[in-house]
Image (cartoon, coloured by chain):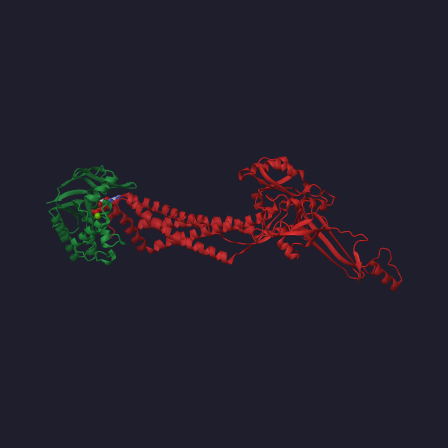
Chain colours: A red, B green
Amino acid sequence: MFTTYLRRELAGRRKQTAIVAIGMALAIALVIIVNAVSAGVQNAQATVLESVYGVGTDITVSQEAVAPTEGEAGTGGPQRFDFGADDGATTDGTTSVSQSRLEPERGTTTFDASALDTVTTVDNVSAAAATLALSNTSFAGEVPDMAATDSTDAAATGTMPAAGERPAGGPDGAGGSAFSVDSFTVLGLDPADEAVGPLSSVTLTEGRTLAAADADTNVAVLDSSYATTASLAVGDTVTIADTDFEIVGLVTATTADAATASNVYIPLDVAQTLSGLTDQVSDIYVQASASTAINQVQSDIETALPDSTVNTQSDLASSVSGSLSSASDLVKNLGLWLSLIVLAAAFLIAILFTISGVTRRTREFGTLKAIGWSNGKIVRQVAGESLVQGLIGGAVGIVVGLAGILVINLVAPTLTAGAATSTEAMGGPGGGPGGFGEAAAAAATSDILLSVPVTFSVILLAVGLSVLGGLIAGMIGGWRASSLRPAEALRSIA
Amino acid sequence: MYELTNVTKTYSQGKRTVTALKNVSVSIPNGQMVAIQGPTGGGKSTLLQMLGALDRPTDGTVELGTSNLSTLGDGKLGKIRATEIGFVFQGFNLIPTLTAQENVETALAPLGIPASERKSRAAEALAAVGLGERLTHLPAELSGGQQQRVAIARALVKEPTVLLADEPTGNLDEDTRDDIMELLEGLWRDRGLTLIVVTHDTAVAARAQRRLHIKQGVLTEVA
Ligand SMILES: Nc1ncnc2c1ncn2[C@@H]1O[C@H](COP(=O)(O)OP(=O)(O)O)[C@@H](O)[C@H]1O
Ligand SMILES: [Mg+2]
């Protein structure tokens, strides 16, 4: 009787069934989509973070940049290249000069490498590695040979330029000159350490990665997209601080869409020597022995190194910027609230329609009671109807939701994500207007195609919600029906 | 066998209280056919509710056989309704989404009777009221008289001892009314039921063995 009656009611009252089911379907579809997009955005965030900070990294340690005191040149000051009279090679009346210099990245503050030992001794630190983030800026140009110009001019006019007056030739004169300024990021890291740090999460595409034997050797590993841009390959030479490095390997981020943390990777000791930053490092990457220990490790390091800034992965997540971060906020806030509101509305619709249905069927339930149906039997009947309506809605909602996810994945919106390096995230005086400071950010900016995963748990959640909605509406409706007096059946409504 | 002693029923609507039954005492032996007449609002339906275990009196006792309907709990009253009492209503009260046969089956559902037996007994009951060919029709596909026959089949399929009918012909035209009354009388005679019929209609009341009149909650015997 239960199933016959249920079937007849749902088929016989199609409009009510359809409205409740559609409301539920919309809500379920929205919940599925919001959930899946949220998971997709989170995956994208994780991808960006991993490519920048390394898979095993739980905590990064850096030092806050101190604003330069008045009269003192800060790291953000203008770049200068000075060339002495004998610099450059002269051919055909043109002097070629070039210089490349390795300096800390704009906004980066370096600190003594002994901090690494301090970090290593903190309880529950399972691995730690120090790196030195540098920027190599090379200046190359051609200027007309001054001697040649002068002699021509002197011969023509017979006069020397007056004191304070520029010679007629020269960089702004008729002689013409060309300069190029090139900059890329260089990361010095301990070649023996592979467990933690920026190189722990990359994929080797060619050659080899740095090994313990590379200490004190002029070898470099390049980010493969930088290598492509700079037309460099394994076996070629890259010049850093006027020193030639042999390229031994190329790496990419584990996911093809993200860039790695730096353009060039070299052994830490070489980096320190060439930049003149002996025993200095800029970041320490720390792995905790357990995720539950992260907070303790963070506070212990903060105590041991009071000048340092200690960030955890969750702090880092907030440094992911760009449209990815907006998408994440949008999904988290708007999406969550929207799906909650629609879900509440769907539940309310189901409840109201069930109640109005019960009210309309007052005489029907009164009659059933009059002929001996128990309250339990009537509650079961009403709850069963609502439950099935909810399940129909859930099934339709899952189909609509999956279709929505399919559409999103087909469209695959591109999100740009800038994972600010830990030093920049602190808002030091780095990153002057344009110019070289942007290189660091550029290294970490990635375009991520949003890919929305469908998980079994989302489907389970949808089914659970539709069952819940159906049951809530059914219990309320059933309770209303069972509280009707059986005498209602005798009410003479024709 | 009904034994009603000083039955009073009051309804309170806000401040106002309505006394629907006043000190009603009456005894109805098994197998009797009784007609209850009276003006609208006189208390006929209220009396039928007391007899049908649908409600408890405010005061006094209602006994059916050995059961005291005025003190039993809802569950017990439900069981008595499911087994002993058949109802026929003025408005037929069929479930619109169920077929004739399924409507009749609803009376057997609380008795824990297996589905196949339910179906065959419902078909038999419909045949007994002359609707053997209409098993799969929905109420909306049947005439008023046919719908009331389905309701009578539903009331009788569980083989109750008492059949209570509240103005069973009130919604029917004159020809159909006679058919239905003849059907009820025939079933009463064949099955030895106690049949209590509330009616406005003197022609209907004339068929009964005994006539009761109720006005403003006061019951009187009509000679
Ligand atoms: N559920 C109820 N609540 C309040 N008053 C009621 C209720 N049922 C019946 N009454 C009142 O009791 C009186 C008797 O009603 P009823 O037994 O239905 O009369 P009849 O069936 O003879 O027309 C009427 O005044 C009616 O208004
Ligand atoms: Mg009445």
Give the left or right position of residue A278, taking residue B143 as reference: right
Give the left or right position of residue B182, taking residue A326 as reference: left
Q: Nearer the viewer, residue B201 or A480?
A: A480
Q: Residue furthest bottom?
A: A156
Q: Nearer the viewer, residue B11 or A287?
A: A287
Is residue A285 among the parts visible in the rendering? yes
Where does residue A425 sit, x and y in percent of width and height? 62, 46
Where does residue A14 sit, x and y in percent of width and height? 33, 56
Is residue A307 among the parts visible in the rendering? no
Q: Nearer the viewer, residue A269 or A302?
A: A269
Where does residue B96 sit, x and y in percent of width and height? 27, 54
Q: Going 68% across and 51% down the picture, which residue do you hit? A: A246
Q: Going 41% across and 53% down the picture, which residue do you hit? A: A397
Where does residue B88 sit, x and y in percent of width and height? 20, 49
Q: Residue furthest front?
A: A213
Q: Going 30% across and 55% down the picture, which residue do you hit? A: A12
Give the left or right position of residue A159, taking residue A359 as reference: right
User: How many numbered markers are drawn?
Assistant: 0
